[in-house]
Image: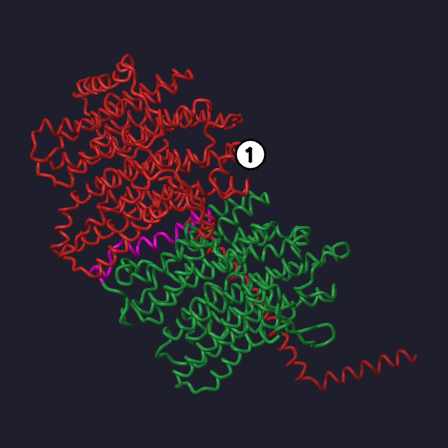
Chain colours: A green, B red
Amino acid sequence: MNAAWLPLTAIAASLLAAVIIFSLPEESRRLRTSINLLAAVIKITLVTLMIQRVVAGDEAIFSFQIVGNIDFVLRADALGVMFAGLSSLLWLCTTVYAIGYLEGTANRKRFFGFFSLCVASTLGIALAGNLFTFLIFYEMLTLSTYPLVVHSGTDKALNAGRIYLRYTLTAGVVLLFGVVLLYSVTGEHSFASERGLGDYLGDHRTLLTFIFALLVGGFAVKAAMVPLHGWLPRAMVAPAPVSALLHAVAVVKAGAFGILRVIYDLYGIELSVELGVTTALAVAACITIIYGSVRAIAQHELKPRLAFSTISQVSYIVLGVSLFGPFGTIGALAHLLHQGLMKVTLFFCAGIYAEELGIHRIDEMDGAGKRMPLTSLAFTVGALGMIGLPPFAGFITKWYLGIGAIQAEMYWVIAVLVASSALNAAYFLPIVYRLWFRVGPAHGHGSWPNEQRLGRLETHGWLLWPAVFTAVISLAAGLLAGLPFSPLDWATRVAVGEYLQ
Amino acid sequence: MITLLLVSALCWPLCVMLLGVWQAYRTPAVQRRYFSWWWLSAAWPALLLAYAGESQWIIDAWMLGGQWSLNALSRPWLAFTALLWSFAAFHARGYFAKEQAKAQTGDHAAERRLLRLALLWPLTFVGNVLLIIAQDIASFYLGFAVMTFAAYALVIHNGTPEAKLGAKAYLILAVIGENLILGGLLWAAGSAETLLLEGVREEIATAEYGALMAGLLWLGLGIKAGVIGLHVWLPLAHPAAPAPASAVLSGAMIKAGLLGWIYVLPLGEPAMSEALVRLGEIILIAGLAAAFGAALYGVWQRHPKAILAYSSISQMGMLTAMIAMGLAAPDVWPLLLPGVVLFAAHHALAKGALFMGTSISEHLPRWPLAVVWILLALPALSLTGAFGAGLISKWTVKSALYEMHHEQLITLLTWAAIGTSALVSVSLWRQWQQRSAGGSHPGQWGAWLATLVAALMTPVWLPLPEASVAIPPLKEWVSLMWPLPAGVLMIGFGLLLTRRLRIGTPPAGDLWWLYAPLGYTVVNALRLSGAWLKNAKSTSVDITLLIEKQVMRRLTQLTGMEGWMRHHTSGLMMALAITLALLLIWEGA
């Protein structure tokens, strides 16, 4: 039985939530909260059902024709379901967090409406079955995140939003050009084709390379690869839950996911290697990894430092993709999930520090571990995971990427990985040191920049529990990576499917 | 049953940690006791485990797939590690008694320090246990990392500028070491597609670049083991750390690097490639250089614990030389291995006793002075190989080397023992100079005496394979013992000769003072390049904006032109009509 309704309802759940939220009055806080949570839970349930079907070897497909050969296709394949699972899980956490974070502020209706739209488009991106459908949701994502980035309405935010649009819309045009060109040359744009584009290699070698550059260049803007990363550090003015979602799931990951789709499902990995584009991509990813880390060291504020760390970490995914071989692929796919879990934790914590204690700068964090032990523990888990220390999730991906690099005989990648973990240590360990080993306001030296008592615990429970939850998951993803349905296990499943085709 | 022991060996210290957190929330600071009985018991299940026999566990769900085992190598290792940790915990209870009393009277700084130490001590221990029983790469690396990073709290405990410097040196070198190890493990494991340390060892033995992989791992693990050039954290961290922490650092944790070498290097492989043999020779030279260099530099130190740190470097240098023999002369390794284990175990306990002894001489118990100093000197005598277990461990190593005719190395090791004798006698002499009465806590001297006894009787309790240890024949005793009087005499003469000269104390940490400015230069260069990149980026953005502005200006000019055209529409249309008419006329004509 083909369950076409599954992917459609999963997207419709968030779309419908958005519509209802927009039509509700601003004051009906309780109803809005329950709709948000209900939609998130429904979505997780639906994605779980899709995962079950994929395990059973049966993909849910929904499609209808738009014009000519162009179809609108939603397909729940293993890769798509993986990204959908991540986004729906983290959406639930972020919704809970955002409800706590925005309590008592203005324009919450607008925020949650666009928030739901944003998630609907992310899910669409995950489940898109061809390039055309992908593009629709990709542009929808661009537009629905803009109101979130400028949410505070300050000059700085508006400016950041303008830059964000300038980058992403230009990229969208480039992408569109690439898609049209590809379609006119090959008539091919489905992610489900078994052969890839190998048949066109003889006649259109240069053109295929050019189209690849257009497509990946377009996606690289959202994936924040150097030198197309300029929007990301500025978009930091957005509220913490938005930054968390932007960095962990929605925008940045959408770009990386696009690159995954182009290489694995559109071109096919053999063709990409044959064209020689993967090596170029690996070099670009390595430059980004190092550049992001070096810039992160120079940041004195917490959120910009995390932003540059994202630039560096997302390119791990691209790096893994460009290493030809199963291990690189597993590493890339697993990091898609791991980075999401760890980064969302870090941003949750950064938001908590800012809300509860008014901390924005790193040198204000002295001794915060005593005042907020759970938050600081979660932050430590995220930071150590980012460095790639065992037993956290980051270690698993670094290990697979390293093995993948060796098997692809790209030994210099090992040096990049090692240098990157050293740099990661250089900008994360001082923060951890400040949290736990320095004396600060909690020990009676000075005072916090702007302390508020938000809750009975160290902070508001709605803020605290999502951070703790994601921290526990990113610990478990590393410690129990051998269990079935762990990120590593699922990534292996996808990669095996890719290489046995 | 043994599995239950394993679980409790790993989980009990973590539970102790959680209990500590619980206590920190429940008990007011005035009544809080950081070193209660359950805290002391953190290492006991692991100690029992070491004597529970051999076993192996395979856990698929654990990280990349876990494989742990207790075998002829890991059992004795676990035994001496857990034993030293248990004694050091007792010593800590006495050592920190005063600080705890201070914390109970409301000193928040002391309270914070003690809490941190009490929480991270068991965690460090868990890491140490895990790396000993691990046979798979991920668990080993996990254990190593946990131990390394958690031990930071042990080093920085006092919070003085010296402690901070020591902790900084420790952490920087630890991070470098972790990365070197990761690089080496990844390289070997990636080429061999293995997840086990066994696989790494085989890959290094056979692969084309095996020697390079081995070199990376040797250096990375060598940071912990104090390989010369990378040893600088030892003399900086040890004098600043509390005595029980120094005892486990220098006794147990330093051996983790050694165990790592034994696990990953293809020691004793029959068909050793030429490059690996060459590496073995390099390691041999480095080991001997450390054994002699540390002795020569260490005797000038003033702080007894700095001297003992140099003695550790020197002793580890000897062990490094023995490891090197496994590569350079593989046939000797099977004979040498029991000796290496015994040597390591004895050094762990003896060094532990010596470090605990420094806290005894600072708070002399109310016993006859002579008794105290004889007791203080016993582990030192044993370490030089002139007495007790030291005599036997040295003989075990020596007889293996004799059998394979490496007399040269024996001579060198004997000379290095003179250095050891010199170092320990200087250390005792400095302790004598800096002694102070004050009465030590029963826990303090109790643990010290227990460690002392355990050190002298190492071969008795260490679960080594049968018949691997023998008492030296009487005629060999002289050859084993003479380095002690030689070392003491040398120091005596040296003192007499240099008494008139005013020689300052060279700084502890020797090469660190060379590395530090270099490191700062590099970091500054990185910062500058970061700033430069930022400038370059903003310049490029400016240029792009400028270009955009220019284009926009051109476009605006176009609009202006349009305006002008709109203004003169009628005239233009007329002109156009006339032009067309003229064209038509010209065509017609």
Please, what is the dominant secondary structure of the magenta stretch? Answer: helix
Note whether residue A115 is visible: no
Instruction: Work out whether residue A45 or residue A33 is closer to the camera in this orientation and state it.
Output: A45
Residue beneath disc 1 = B207
Q: Within 10 Å of the Cα at label 1, are there few (<14), some (14-19), or many (20+) other Cα atoms? A: some
Mark 1 — on which chain does it sit?
A: B
- Secondary structure, mark 1, is loop
Q: What count of labels does the image hold?
A: 1
Residue A397 shown left or right of residue B38 in the figure: right
Indicate whether residue A445 is drawn in magenta: yes
Note whether residue B152 is visible.
yes
Residue sitting nearer the eye, A216 or A333: A333
Quarter of the view holding residue A348: bottom left
The percent position of residue A320, horizontal first and vertical second, equals 55, 53
Screen quadrant of the C terminus of chain B: bottom right
Q: In this picture, is B379 found above or below A67?
A: above
Magenta-drawn stretch contains B106: no
Q: Is residue B310 above or below residue B183?
A: above
Where B512 sits versus A93, above or below?
above
The residue lying furthest to the front in this view is: B1
Residue A265, position as x, y percentages in the image: 64, 60
Q: Given the image, on which type of amino acid does mark 1 rest?
A: Ala
In the image, the segment drawn in magenta is A419-446
Q: Residue A276 at x, y = what percent?
A: 66, 50
Report whether A61 appears left or right of B399. right
Foreground pick, A250 / B498 = A250
| Residue drawn at the location 45% of the way across and 78% of the way down | A38
Q: In x, y percent, where is residue B392?
A: 29, 23
